[in-house]
């Protein structure tokens, strides 16, 4: 290896306000939710989804609760179950990090279904709008992972490799940035281009299915460069936990896209 980029000295705490610390990860969640909410309002207003902006405003609270509770429960059950069984009080220490995207997605999905049932909104209408804004939060979340020097990649000799403080002396793939580019930027562009096509936009569930399948493919690819969690390692067939969790997402997404070809939109 001829060159590696030393990890910049980035404090995981962005700002301290008395006894409270504002961390990059918290800022990522705030930016993702606020910017996603603003775009959601704009899309609901300009697109024929028939969802008023007041409902979008109210759903922001539901989505926030869903992503936090779902993300934390998913992390506890899927990634560190034995640790939290031994230290149950730590489950509530969300400010120390530890969130699962797959759990957060399920939490938002449950919140969305309950919200739509309560407001009389077609679930897939809201789902298609959320699909077009969700990559924003994914982008900021992965950038925050990079700033925190966590979830780094496998050892490599590529010119843009980075030596992470917690990754030993080995230069590694900045896999967090790969995920930010794939799950965030690329998926956002693809979904919002599809949204502009009336024949696609009118197929309820197509954009939701595209998001699920697109995220799954992006995550499976990115995990090929990402160092698996030390306490989990590689699982069956040499795949990581993130890859295995993405497999059902891929099939569900493909099924939803296929279903729109057979079920008329309403």
Image (cartoon, helix red, strand yellow):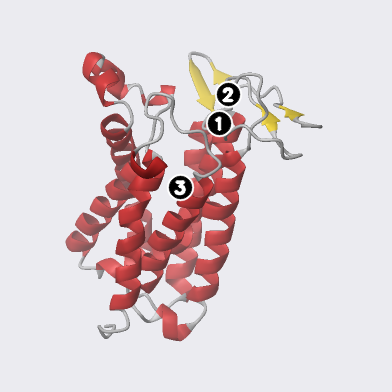
- Asked whether the beta carbons under mark 2 and mark 1 sit within 8 Å of each other, the answer is yes
Lower position in the chain sequence, tag 1 or tag 3: 1
- Asked whether the beta carbons under mark 1 and mark 3 sit within 8 Å of each other, the answer is no
Camera-side mark, 2 or 3: 2
Q: Residue 157's spot in the image, x, y percent?
A: 71, 35
Residue receiving disc 2 = 12
* Disc on res. 33: 3
Q: Quadrant of residue 85?
A: top left
Residue depicted at x 46% and y 63%: 132
- Asked whether the beta carbons under mark 2 and mark 3 sit within 8 Å of each other, the answer is no
Mark 2 crowdedness (10 Å alpha carbons): few <14, some 14-19, many ≥20:
some
What's the distance in space between the residues labelled 1 and 3, CA to CA?
A: 14 Å
Q: Residue 211's spot in the image, x, y percent?
A: 42, 62
Total labels drawn = 3
Kindly tell me whether residue 52 is visible in this rendering.
no
Secondary structure of residue under mark 2:
loop
Residue receiving disc 1 = 24
- Work out whether 107 lies above or below 13: below
């Amino acid at each position: 290896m001829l060159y590696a980029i030393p990890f910049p000295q980035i404090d995981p705490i962005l700002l301290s306000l008395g006894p409270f610390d504002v961390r990059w990860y918290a800022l990522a969640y705030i930016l993702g939710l606020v910017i996603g909410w603003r775009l959601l309002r704009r899309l609901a207003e300009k697109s024929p989804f028939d969802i008023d902006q007041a409902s979008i405003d109210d759903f922001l609270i539901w989505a926030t609760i869903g992503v936090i509770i779902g993300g934390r429960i998913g992390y506890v059950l899927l990634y560190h179950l034995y640790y939290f069984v031994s230290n149950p009080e730590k489950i509530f220490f969300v400010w120390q990090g530890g969130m699962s995207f797959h759990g957060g997605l399920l939490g938002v999905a449950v919140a969305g279904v309950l919200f739509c049932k309560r407001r009389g909104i077609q679930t897939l209408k809201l789902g298609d709008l959320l699909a077009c804004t969700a990559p924003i939060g994914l982008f900021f979340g992965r950038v925050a992972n990079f700033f925190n020097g966590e979830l780094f990649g496998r050892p490599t000799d590529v010119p843009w490799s980075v030596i992470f403080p917690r990754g030993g002396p080995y230069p590694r793939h900045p896999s967090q940035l790969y995920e930010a580019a794939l799950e965030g930027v690329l998926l956002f562009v693809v979904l919002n281009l599809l949204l502009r096509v009336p024949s696609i936009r009118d197929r309820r569930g197509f954009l939701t299915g595209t998001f699920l399948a697109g995220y799954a493919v992006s995550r499976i690819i990115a995990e090929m460069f990402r160092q698996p969690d030390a306490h989990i390692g590689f699982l069956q067939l040499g795949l990581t936990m993130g890859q295995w969790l993405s497999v059902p997402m891929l099939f569900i997404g493909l099924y939803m896209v296929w279903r729109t070809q057979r079920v008329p939109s309403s």
